[in-house]
Image (tube, rainbow, N blue to C red):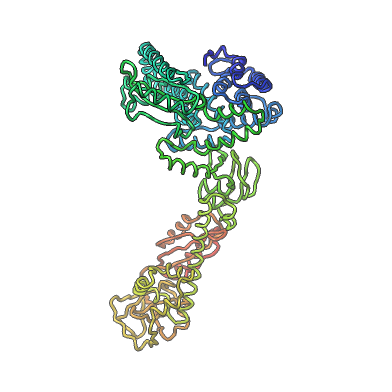
Amino acid sequence: MSHAKDELTVQDVLEQAKTYITDEEQLQFIERAYLFAKEKHTGQYRKTGEDYIIHPLNVAMILTTIYADYETIAAGFLHDVLEDCDCTPEEMEEKFGAEVTKLVQGVTKLSKIHFSTENDYLIDYYKKIIVGMSEDVRVIIIKLADRLHNMRTLWATPPDRQKVKAKEALEILAPIAHHLGIHKIKSELEDLALRYLKPDVFYDIAEKLNKTKLERDRTVVEMQKEVSDLLTEHHINHEIKGRAKCIYSIYNKLNKGKKFSDIYDLLALRILVHTEQECYLALGIIHSKFRPLPKRFKDYIAMPKPNMYQSLHTTVFGIDGYLFEIQIRTYDMDEVAENGIASHWAYKENKGSNKTANLQSTTEQKLQFFKSIIDLSKDKMSSEEFVNSVKDEVLNNNIYCFTPKGDVIELPKGATPIDFAYKIHTKVGETTTGAIVNNTIVPLNYELQNNDIVRIITNKNATPSMEWINIVKATTTRNKIKNFFSKNEKEVYMDRGKYTLEKELRKKKIAISDFSSEENLKALNEEFKLDSMDDIYLAIGNGKTSALSLINFLYKEPESVQPKNIKVTSKNMDADIIVSGIDKVRVNLANCCCPVYGDDIIGYITKGNGISVHRTNCHNLEMLETRTLEVHWNSNVNKRYLTNILIYTNTHENHMLDLMQVISSMNVSVDGIKTMSKVDTILYEASIYVTGLDQLTKLFSNLEKQNYVDHCERLMR
């Protein structure tokens, strides 16, 4: 841009626009946008001390240099009006129409995002967000022009801010400009960013370029004349330009270990011709006189870059042995390379038609391509990988919503508040009861829109609904909901299996403790791959096996055994239990009912495992009189007994610590405690050691005095 910033006027912008916009009404529209912006920004100043309108003027001028359409230039003038001035979207739409207002609103939304360049993931994420939030790619182009002028005046901001903005420009915005093919903006953003991020390196390269400028310029002029004469001799109409030296690209090459004198594009020419065929003819003619450097030829015409850049690149040994990098392209290809394909379409189509609606529709349709590939790293991909990635990204049509704190949540198009809640955290999703979108209560099947601000209402007692599976959009959300119900279904199956097994065992007059002996579990695991009682309950409950088949497998020859016929060899004497009429017998306290001293008890004669002692009210002893015998407690023994209790509460608040304190205060040891949520309350299961029934009764009494405890009972399995 040739104008100094303090000399720039709206007339300069209009003169530049006239080079490609011929419609007088469109030019007047641009001027009206300028006058409106100037009026609204009156009294506002930049950090540089200038009138604020200088910024929109520069943004508009940058847009004209890349051939932006008249609506984009108007939006460039107006881009800060909604955010910084007293103006409503309604007022803007009335004066400049829905299209321009939409562009300005898009830029305003982008300006509210706080970018982060902490790591590669975040950099890619924010590139994706910029594109995802910009329904019209012209929003991004205005944003790039806005940032470019801000970078030109970055000296007016504090040094720490300069580094942050320079890093954003270099790592987020310059790559977007590159993918949109806007070389002018991309290279200037990169150079300005380097100037603030690594000033020593920047000025060192600039100084070296200046020192060698005279010699380079003389050499380039001589080479330019030789190549031009050669092409003219072969009747190829052409134009030859010297190439601008991008300091950042030189820095990148130096960074890779190259010497300053070895960088090819320090001496560079660009040849413009009229047709694609002439590009290849010119290349052949140049190679016939100037020997090409091996492996430096690239054909981007036959295989364009993803941003539609087309050109032939070659490096040749030129005059005096200097290496020259030469680019050969058509005028159309050059326009695309410099100004971006987006602006190029708008420019070309507008020249031939005044049908703005058609233009917008066609341009939007073509630009969808960019919206889908912007954040892909093409340089590392093969052609096949690139095509596949584009297919994947085109299908991946995302929206971006915000939490009330301003965090960005990425979701698939059509997502609901439930998807949003699960994206924050699975627990938030599972306890969701409602949603407020943009300060309005909405149903849970509400379809979220781009830029919605979503607040999720939760209740810790709430659980998901099966209907949600049909409401949500994201596959991950659906899977999380299914997992929740699978887990709950498992518990239902286990309860069902336990009930069925116990019922069959009672019919067969077999105690559960006998069935679940270590020997039996080992046999069941070897035959059925069921290595615990839980696995057995689940297999029976979900129908994979029947209780009867397991029982029949273990008890192939049921025996009717009378106590008097049993001969039990004893290894360990348990002196707390006295068995009537039998000495030296192995005695075990049954795990199903966990008897404690003071309980009414009865003995059950097991097969090969001595006598199992049960409480007389244990449901596992029903109809088993033929294998029972009388036992009683030895009052001389003083020890603790393990038993299991259930504590029912009337609240969903967690009182586990309180309960443990109450239990411990009574000199009762806790072996383990776990929670089991009911619909709106919590049930606790505890394994404890007590001296006997008296201590257990007192414990129940103390627990039931707590206002959150409903009642207590002993667990019988």
Along the horizontal axis of the image, is 372 left or right of 261?
A: right
Single out the residue that lies furthest toward the front: 234
Residue 36 x %, y %: 67, 21
Q: Quadrant of residue 470?
A: bottom right
Q: Does 127 appear above or below 331?
A: below
Residue closest to the eye, 127 or 339: 339
Residue closest to the eye, 89 or 588: 89
Residue 587 x %, y %: 35, 77
Q: Does 532 appear above or below 481?
A: below
Along the horizontal axis of the image, is 17 left or right of 690?
A: right
Residue closest to the eye, 276 or 103: 276
Single out the residue that lies furthest toward the right: 94
Q: Is residue 636 visible?
A: no
Along the horizontal axis of the image, is 379 left or right of 153?
A: left
Residue 361 x %, y %: 62, 35
Q: Is residue 561 visible?
A: yes
Residue 226 x %, y %: 39, 15
Which residue is located at x 47 percent, y 64 percent?
A: 699
Residue closest to the eye, 221 or 548: 221
Q: Quadrant of residue 325?
A: top left
Q: Does 316 appear above or below 584?
A: above
Q: How many marks?
A: 0
